[in-house]
């Protein structure tokens, strides 16, 4: 038996994907069709490709992970509403690049109504789309837009034979993204798993940390755990910033030595079944916070815990961020890093020298997940049961002359993943400590 393996949660069933497609189709006007291309392989260098990552919207509606597929939704079609075009079976290609389902396998494994090989795509599309006047495609996808143009040209030609051409083009993204914003129970199960793998990885990095290692050693500990537990790897580029590298928000070089008295900031999350974890912890390289480090850390922690506590249905990300800004600004004044009154320092934005990002983003199949943040220019989206968000305040104190010496070059962020529940919230990433005493104890006991 291999050590310490977490049980894998069940995958989402083909039936659940079919229900999502039905829910999307229920939103469409009469005579509509939807075209959503999946992702293709991307070249890394010459003959090498990046590992395949499916387009999140396509995956959300199909569960299919093969490249170069196309989903066509045809509400009301008697022979079946969900059609997929896919790669053909090809023993020679499959010997090089792996198994393909082919059209027969797609219908059997993914329970779509009809599947055809890509070679048949152009010939079949115009027949499938005959009489469909409203075409929904993702407007941010050049391949989908090119396909929409092609469909228009073909249906326009059909006008001479008495067929109505496509007359309306619509962006399908807002419809799918509104669905993705509210996670189902089976999605939350997968997200909890991604979060728990991520939490274990952070604990592992805390245990391994010591002066003399470099940032990439902790990256290796983190990413080992992601893959060991069956994740596909990091959901985004792992950030390990020792010392003032922690002040660089998107620091991914991870190449510096870890210094004895420094803090190290790790922002890393596993991807599991395409769902992202997203955790940040900041801890002392050698296991014990200095007095100045503890003061700043406790300031960020209090703001973070206050923000998590405020999460419940009806609250908004704006309110949560405003509370964080107040707490951090009050902390900065108390630490002597800002002068004067808290309200004034909030009003003149001087806190932004130390806290320049927002507190939360949606989390799901994408680490910065889709879904609107505002209903209109003045109205933030109220939180609802099933939404998943991050809470990630930080303080980034520059290594500058006017900063008191003990605080210089300190970057501290604390980030958890939180699901909104009927009674408030549930922290998915509670498996990795964030209180000072808990971190010090974990690091002391290795
Ligand atoms: N890791 C990206 C973020 O925290 O937003
Ligand atoms: Mn985040
Ligand atoms: Mn993060």
Image (cartoon, helix red, strand yellow):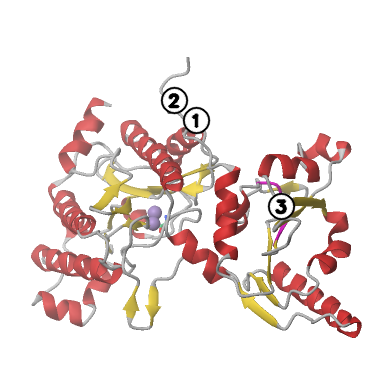
- Residue bearing the label numbered 3: 41
Q: CA distance from mark 1 to mark 3?
A: 25 Å
Name the one closer to the observer, 229 or 84.
84
| Position in image of residue 72 (x %, y %) | 71, 61
Q: Which residues are magenta?
A: 65-72
Q: Residue at x 21, y 69 (%)?
A: 325
Earlier along the polypeptide chain: callout 3 or callout 2?
Answer: 2
Q: Identify whether 102 is placed above or below 4.
A: below
- The reply to whether callout 1 and callout 2 are in contact (CB within 8 Å) is yes
- Residue bearing the label numbered 1: 228
Q: Residues within 10 Å of mark 2 (few under 14, many from 20)?
A: few
Name the one closer to the observer, 393 or 289.
393
Numbered circle sitting on residue 5:
2
SS at circle 1 = helix
Q: Identify whether 201 is placed above or below 422.
A: above
Question: Relative to 412, is 375 on the left or the right?
Answer: right
* Res. 369 in view: no
Residue 192 falls in image quadrant? top left
Q: Identify whether 250 is placed above or below 170.
A: above
Q: Residue at x 39, y 60 (%)?
A: 249
Ligand 3 shows up in the quarter that is bottom left
Q: CA distance from mark 1 to mark 2?
A: 8 Å
């Amino acid at each position: 038996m291999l050590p310490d393996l977490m049980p894998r949660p069940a995958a989402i069933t083909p039936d659940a994907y079919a229900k999502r497609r039905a829910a999307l189709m229920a939103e469409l006007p009469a005579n509509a069709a939807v075209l959503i291309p999946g992702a293709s392989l991307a070249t890394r260098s010459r003959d090498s490709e990046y590992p395949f990552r499916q387009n999140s919207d396509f995956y959300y509606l199909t569960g299919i992970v093969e490249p170069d597929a196309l989903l066509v939704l045809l509400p009301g079609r008697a022979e079946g509403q969900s059609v997929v075009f896919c790669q053909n079976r090809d023993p020679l290609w499959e010997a090089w690049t792996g198994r393909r389902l082919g059209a027969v396998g797609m219908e059997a494994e993914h329970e779509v109504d009809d599947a055809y090989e890509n070679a048949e795509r152009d010939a079949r599309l115009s027949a499938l789309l005959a009489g469909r006047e409203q075409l929904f495609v993702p407007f941010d996808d050049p391949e989908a837009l090119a396909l929409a143009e092609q469909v228009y040209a073909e249906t326009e030609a059909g006008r001479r034979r008495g067929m109505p051409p496509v007359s309306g083009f619509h962006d399908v993204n807002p419809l799918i993204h509104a669905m993705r914003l509210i996670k189902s129970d089976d999605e939350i199960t997968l997200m909890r798993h991604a979060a728990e793998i991520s939490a274990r990885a952070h604990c592992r990095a805390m245990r391994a940390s010591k002066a003399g290692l470099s940032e990439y050693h902790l990256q290796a500990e983190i990413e080992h755990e992601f893959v060991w537990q069956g994740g596909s790897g990091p959901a985004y580029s792992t950030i390990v910033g020792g010392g003032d590298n922690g002040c660089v928000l998107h620091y991914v070089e991870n190449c510096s030595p870890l210094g004895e008295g420094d803090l190290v900031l790790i922002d890393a999350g596993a991807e599991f079944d395409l769902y992202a974890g997203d955790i940040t912890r900041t801890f002392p390289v050698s296991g014990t916070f200095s007095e100045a480090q503890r003061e700043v850390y406790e300031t960020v922690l209090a703001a973070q815990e206050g923000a998590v506590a405020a999460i419940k249905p009806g609250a908004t990300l704006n309110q949560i961020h405003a509370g964080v800004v107040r707490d951090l600004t009050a902390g900065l004044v108390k630490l002597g890093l800002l002068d004067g009154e808290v309200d004034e320092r909030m009003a003149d934005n001087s806190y932004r020298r130390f806290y320049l990002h927002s507190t939360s983003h949606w989390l799901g199949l994408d680490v910065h997940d889709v879904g609107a943040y505002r209903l209109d220019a003045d109205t933030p989206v109220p939180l609802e049961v099933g939404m998943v968000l991050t809470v990630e305040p930080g303080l980034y104190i520059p290594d500058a002359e006017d900063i008191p010496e003990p605080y210089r070059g300190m970057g501290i962020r604390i980030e958890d993943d939180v699901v909104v529940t009927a009674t408030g919230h549930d922290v998915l990433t509670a498996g990795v400590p964030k209180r000072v005493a808990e971190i010090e104890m974990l690091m002391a006991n290795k």
